Amino acid sequence: MDEFHPERLKRRREAMNITRAEVARRTGMSAGGYGLIEAGRLVPYPSQILKLERALGPMESWPAGDDVALKRTGDEVGEE
């Protein structure tokens, strides 16, 4: 499982145009608990990440932010 990044969670929720309360409802989490996860104050258990992925799609599809370095291809020395 990939490392969890709460800022990506927030970006994904916002891209889907849904509220924190709606994500909490879809996942069966409390609104307060979900808010803590999205704020980065609580690290979700693997079971909670699975619920989030069911509600928002796989983590790989969540928008990347400053937590992910940009990869450049084709211009490194020695690459063809």
Image (cartoon, grey):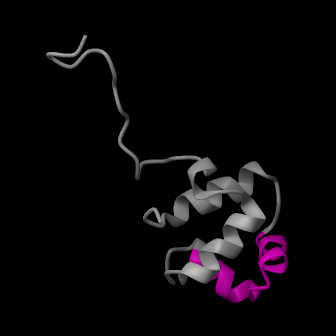
Q: Position of residue 14 (x, y in %)?
A: 73, 54
Total marks in image:
0
Q: Is residue 1 magenta?
A: no
Q: From the viewer's perspective, is residue 63 above or below residue 43? A: above
Q: Is residue 2 left or right of residue 9?
A: left
Q: Quadrant of residue 23?
A: bottom right
Q: Taking 25 as reference, is 52 above or below it? A: above
Q: Quadrant of the C terminus?
A: top left
Quadrant of residue 78 in the image? top left
Q: Position of residue 59 (x, y in %)?
A: 59, 57
Q: Residue at x 51, y 84 (%)?
A: 42
The foreground one among 46 and 71 is 46
Q: Is residue 63 above or below residue 51?
A: above
Residue at point 56% right, 57% down?
Answer: 8
Furthest residue to the top?
Answer: 80
SS majority, magenta: helix
Side of 64 relative to 66 (left or right): right
Percent coordinates x, y for residue 19 in the rendering: 81, 66
In the image, residue 59 sits, relative to residue 19, either above or below, namely: above
Q: Residue at x 84, y 72 (%)?
A: 22
| View extreme (front): residue | 80
Which residue shows up at 73% across the image and 60% down it? 56
Q: In the image shown, does 53 or 13 lie closer to the viewer?
A: 53
Q: Is residue 31 magenta?
A: yes
First to last magenta residue range: 20-37
Q: Position of residue 27 (x, y in %)?
A: 77, 78
In this rendering, position of residue 31 left or right of residue 59: right
